[in-house]
């Protein structure tokens, strides 16, 4: 994990360093005086060698100091906290809805393999993968906000306004994010279950008189969950870090929109710290997924036979 984080931090830092443009010039404008630019560059530490700035940045990360935003002139940690209270619940809601849709559909498809229900589920999953989520988001806005007028088209009411208005603000973004993810998860669940159902111990359980339903739920499903949990972990990482388009479509002040604004304003300190924090979250989530493998499959716990 530490090696991966170190490699990711070096890539993030040095890739941003080679981008054209000067953050000080962006902040002050093209007509700024040379001495003013030099003073701002010194204040931001841009006049120091690249290697010195890199190790200084790593030291600040270890201490939890994310620096001050060039654009907003406030600590980056405060910006992240303000946006995370929207993005994290949105990711939780989306992955929950995706799972509630995908797992039952995957089980239905696998248990009705080559039957009409299987084909219907596969058509749904193929459409979910093929349709871009931003187009689906616009379609939801047109139907539920423009024509029906039952849900807000964008913006976030805030948790201070109450749990119901806040959740209503996140309902359409949640659906727009969950549909493509549920389509992928449905296919993975179906494929994993079909593979497990071909194993010898499944045939043995059926030969001993276990019903099809009991065999599916007691033996097959749990063993088929490892690849499903892997995909769920990757999807949650994506939903936490990759909602830039959806947050811009619905004008949500989340992490994704903050990254978009920081890139547009060349606020490099925000971009660097956000990207490395999101990379770290992906690594941690994958670590948690690895730990869940042992919970799902006792064979992976390394227990010795006595």
Image (cartoon, grey):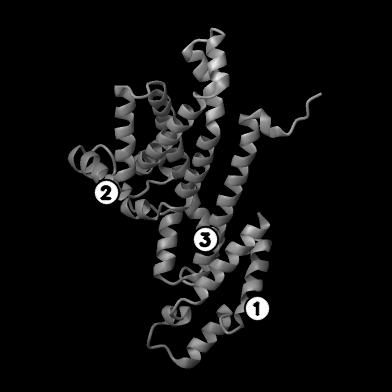
In the picture, the quarter occupied by the N terminus is bottom right
Distance between the alpha carbons at the discs numbered 1 and 2: 45 Å
User: Which residue corresponds to the image point at 29% horizontal and 23% vertical from the top-left?
Assistant: 116
User: Which residue corresponds to the image point at 46% horizontal and 27% vertical from the top-left?
Assistant: 194
Which residue is the site of mark 2? 135
Question: x, y (%) of residue 104?
Answer: 42, 26
- Residue 275 — which label? 3
Left or right relative to 59: residue 174: left
User: Which residue corresponds to the image point at 27% horizontal and 48% vertical from the top-left?
Assistant: 135
Q: Which tag, 1 or 2, sits closer to the chain's start?
A: 1
Instruction: Classify residue 190 by image quadrant.
Output: top left
Q: Is residue 93 visible?
A: yes
Which residue is the site of mark 1? 52
| Closer-to-camera residue (112/260) | 112
Question: x, y (%) of residue 213?
Answer: 47, 14
Instruction: Classify residue 183 by image quadrant.
Output: top left
């Amino acid at each position: 994990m530490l090696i991966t984080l170190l490699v990711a931090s070096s890539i993030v830092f040095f890739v941003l360093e080679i981008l054209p443009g000067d953050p000080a010039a962006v902040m002050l404008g093209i007509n700024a005086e040379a001495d003013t630019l030099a003073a701002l560059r010194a204040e931001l530490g841009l006049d120091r060698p690249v290697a010195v700035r890199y190790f200084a940045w790593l030291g600040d990360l270890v201490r939890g100091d994310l620096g001050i935003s060039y654009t907003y002139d406030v600590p980056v940690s405060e910006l992240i906290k303000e946006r995370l209270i929207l993005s994290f619940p949105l990711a939780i809601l989306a992955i929950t809805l995706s799972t509630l849709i995908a797992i039952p559909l995957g089980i239905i498809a696998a248990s009705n393999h080559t039957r009409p229900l299987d084909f219907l589920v596969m058509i749904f999953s193929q459409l979910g993968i093929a349709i871009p989520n931003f187009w689906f988001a616009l379609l939801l806005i047109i139907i539920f906000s423009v024509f029906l007028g039952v849900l807000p088209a964008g913006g976030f009411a805030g948790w201070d306004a109450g749990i119901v208005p806040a959740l209503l603000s996140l309902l359409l973004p949640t659906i727009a994010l969950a549909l493509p993810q549920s389509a992928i998860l449905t296919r993975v669940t179906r494929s994993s279950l079909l593979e497990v159902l071909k194993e010898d111990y499944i045939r043995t359980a059926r030969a001993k008189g276990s019903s099809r339903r009991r065999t599916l739920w007691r033996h097959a499903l749990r063993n088929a969950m490892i690849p499903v949990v892997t995909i769920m972990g990757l999807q949650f990482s994506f939903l936490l870090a990759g909602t830039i388009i959806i947050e811009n479509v619905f004008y949500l002040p989340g992490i994704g929109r903050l990254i978009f604004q920081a890139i547009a304003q060349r606020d490099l300190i925000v971009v660097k710290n956000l990207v490395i924090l999101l990379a770290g979250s992906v690594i941690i989530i994958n670590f948690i997924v690895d730990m869940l493998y042992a919970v799902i499959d006792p064979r992976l716990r390394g227990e010795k036979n006595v």
